[in-house]
Image: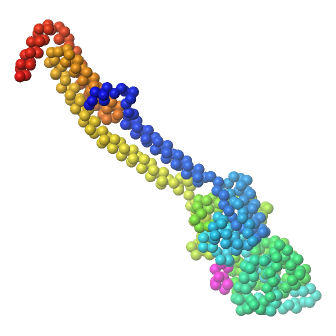
C-alpha cells in the first residue's frame, strides 16, 4: 500500500460498507412504503363516472338524485349524469366509449362492451281497450288477435315500445302492417289519449308507474278499460330471452281508478344499469355497494328506487354481469391489501434478496483488500523479532513509521467493512507486541555503549555475509 493511502486522514475515508448497505436498504423500504402509499391514494381517491340516461323522466330524476347524494356524502364513486333522448341513445353512448355507465333497456340491442351492474327496474307491458260509455262492448276486442284493422295508441315516442307491440302482434299471427299504430307522447299522455280515440292502448313500465296509471285514467274518461292478457308470454320469452313471462296482480296498477279484477298475464323486461367492459372491478364494486347502500334513503322521494335489484350473475344472462358487480353480489369484493398483498410481499422478498446479493457482492469485491490486510498483519508479526534484533534507533524509527502506516490501513479496512472486529482484535494484539518489542529494544540500545552497538551490528553483518 502506498504512503499516500496509508496516510489518508480519517475524515476523508469513505462511508462504511455496512452503513451504506443499511442506508440502501432503508431507502428501498422508504421507496416501497411510498409506492404502497401512492397506490393506496390512487385507489382511494374519488372517481367520477359519467352515466348516460334518458329520456327525461323518472329514470333521469332518480339518477340525478343518486348523483347528488353521492357527491354530498363525499363517496368514493361520484356520478355525472349525461341526459340522452332515449335508452337506445344511452346504449350508443356507452358503445362509443363516451360514458362509463348507462341505463339501457334489456330488450334493445345491448352494446358488446356493456356489463350489468344492477337491475334498475322490472317493467311489464299493459295492454287495454276501452268500451265507450253508453254503447256497451261495441268494440268487441277481448283478445290480442282481434287488434287487426284497429288503431292502437302506444305511450311513448320511443320506437322500442312500437316494436314491442309488433312482436306481440306477430306472435298472435297479426300483421303489424294492418294495425294503425299511433305513438303518443309520454309527457302529456292524458291529452294525447283524449285526442286519439284509439281502440286499444299499450304502455310499458313498472307496475306502479305513475305514467301507466295516468294513461289508464285518461282513457277511462271515455269508457271502461278492459285489460287484455298476453297468454303467449311464455312463447315470446322462449324465442326472445330479453323478455320474460310476467303477471299484473289484481289492483296493482298504481293510483289508477281502473284496475284488473284478476291477475293478467303479460310479458316483462328489465332496465339495467350497465358499465363499459374494462372499467375497474374495484370501481364498479364500490359503485354497486354505494348504490344499494343509499337505495333506502331515496325510496321516500323516489319509490322506484325500491325496485333496484342485484344483477343476474348467471353465465347465460342476457346482459353479462360485470366482474366487479359479481364480486359485490357474491361477497368476494377484495380490499386494498387483498389486491396488492402479493405485490407487496414479492417486493419485500426482492428487496431482501437484493440486499443479500449486494452484501455478498461487496464482500466478494473486497476479497483482495482482505488478503492485502492479512499480508500487512503478517508483515507486522515479522517486524516483532526484527525489532528485538535491531541495533539502530534509526532503524527502529523506520519500523515504527511502517507500523503506523499498517495501522492506518487496517483501521481504514475496518471502517470500510473489509475486516471484522475479530480481525481488528488480532491486529491489536500483534501491534501491542510490536510496540513492546520496540520499547524494550530502544531501552536496551540507550543503555548499551556506542562501541558495543557498532560491534554488534558489524558482527551480525559479517554473519549475514
Residue 251 lies left or right of residue 465; in this view the side is: right
Residue 331 lies left or right of residue 350; in this view the side is: right
Residue 166, image x and y in percent? Answer: 73, 86
In this orientation, which residue lies closer to the viewer: 444 or 320?
444
In this orientation, which residue lies closer to the viewer: 101 or 404?
404
Q: Which residues are magenta?
A: 234-244
Residue at x 46% of width, y 42% of height: 27
Residue 143 lies left or right of residue 330; in this view the side is: right
In this orientation, which residue lies closer to the viewer: 321 or 383?
383
Residue 365, image x and y in percent? Answer: 31, 41
Q: Quarter of the image holding residue 246?
A: bottom right
Asked whether residue 14 appears in the rendered view, the answer is yes
In this orientation, which residue lies closer to the viewer: 95 or 263?
95
- Where 431 sits versus 217, above or below? above
Q: Examine the structure image and report whether residue 171 is included in the region drawn in magenta.
A: no
Residue 387, image x and y in percent? Answer: 18, 19
Q: Quarter of the image holding residue 238?
A: bottom right
Residue at x 73% of width, y 73% of height: 86
- Where 76 sits versus 352, above or below? below
**Colouring scheme applied when the structure was drawn:** rainbow
Quadrant location, the N terminus: top left
Residue at x 75% of width, y 71% of height: 85
Asked whether residue 217 appears in the rendered view, the answer is no
- Where 60 sits versus 78, above or below? below
Q: How many marks?
A: 0
Amino acid at each position: 500500500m502506498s504512503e499516500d493511502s496509508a496516510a489518508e486522514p480519517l475524515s476523508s475515508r469513505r462511508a462504511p460498507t455496512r452503513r451504506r448497505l443499511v442506508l440502501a436498504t432503508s431507502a428501498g423500504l422508504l421507496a416501497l412504503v411510498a409506492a404502497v402509499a401512492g397506490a393506496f391514494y390512487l385507489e382511494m381517491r374519488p372517481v367520477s363516472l359519467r352515466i348516460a340516461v334518458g329520456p327525461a323522466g323518472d329514470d333521469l330524476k332518480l339518477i340525478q338524485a343518486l348523483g347528488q347524494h353521492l357527491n354530498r356524502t363525499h363517496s368514493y364513486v361520484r356520478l355525472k349524469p349525461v341526459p340522452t333522448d332515449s335508452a337506445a341513445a344511452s346504449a350508443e353512448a356507452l358503445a362509443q366509449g363516451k360514458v362509463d355507465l348507462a341505463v339501457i333497456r334489456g330488450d334493445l340491442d345491448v352494446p358488446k362492451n356493456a356489463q350489468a351492474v344492477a337491475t334498475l327496474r322490472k317493467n311489464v307491458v299493459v295492454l287495454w281497450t276501452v268500451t265507450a260509455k253508453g254503447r256497451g262492448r261495441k268494440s268487441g276486442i277481448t283478445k290480442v288477435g282481434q287488434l287487426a284493422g284497429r288503431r292502437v295508441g302506444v305511450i311513448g315516442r320511443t320506437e322500442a315500445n312500437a316494436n314491442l307491440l309488433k312482436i306481440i302482434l306477430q306472435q298472435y299471427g297479426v300483421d303489424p302492417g294492418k294495425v294503425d299504430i299511433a305513438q303518443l307522447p309520454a309527457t302529456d299522455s292524458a291529452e294525447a289519449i283524449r285526442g286519439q280515440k284509439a281502440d286499444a292502448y299499450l304502455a310499458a313500465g313498472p307496475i306502479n308507474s305513475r305514467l301507466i296509471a295516468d294513461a289508464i285514467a285518461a282513457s277511462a274518461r271515455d269508457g271502461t278499460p278492459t285489460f287484455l292478457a298476453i297468454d303467449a308470454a311464455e312463447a315470446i320469452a322462449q324465442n326472445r330471452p330479453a323478455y320474460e313471462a310476467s303477471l299484473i296482480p289484481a289492483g296493482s296498477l298504481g293510483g289508477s281508478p281502473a284496475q284488473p279484477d284478476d291477475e293478467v298475464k303479460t310479458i316483462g323486461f328489465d332496465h339495467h344499469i350497465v358499465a363499459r367492459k374494462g372499467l375497474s372491478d374495484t370501481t364498479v364494486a364500490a359503485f354497486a355497494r354505494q348504490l344499494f347502500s343509499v337505495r333506502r334513503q331515496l325510496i321516500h322521494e323516489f319509490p322506484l328506487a325500491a325496485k333496484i335489484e342485484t344483477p343476474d350473475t348467471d353465465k347465460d344472462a342476457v346482459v353479462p354481469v360485470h366482474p366487479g358487480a359479481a364480486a359485490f353480489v357474491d361477497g368476494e369484493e377484495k380490499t386494498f391489501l387483498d389486491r396488492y398483498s402479493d405485490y407487496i410481499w414479492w417486493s419485500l422478498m426482492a428487496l431482501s434478496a437484493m440486499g443479500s446479493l449486494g452484501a455478498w457482492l461487496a464482500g466478494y469485491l473486497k476479497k483482495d483488500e482482505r488478503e492485502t490486510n492479512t499480508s500487512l498483519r503478517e508483515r507486522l508479526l515479522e517486524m516483532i523479532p526484527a525489532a528485538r534484533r535491531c541495533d539502530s534507533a534509526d532503524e527502529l524509527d523506520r519500523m515504527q513509521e511502517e507500523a503506523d502506516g499498517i495501522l492506518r490501513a487496517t483501521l481504514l479496512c475496518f471502517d470500510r467493512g473489509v475486516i471484522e472486529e475479530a480481525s481488528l482484535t488480532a491486529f491489536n494484539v500483534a501491534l501491542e507486541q510490536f510496540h513492546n518489542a520496540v520499547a524494550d529494544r530502544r531501552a536496551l540500545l540507550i543503555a548499551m555503549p556506542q562501541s558495543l552497538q557498532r560491534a554488534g551490528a558489524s558482527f551480525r553483518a559479517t554473519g549475514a555475509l
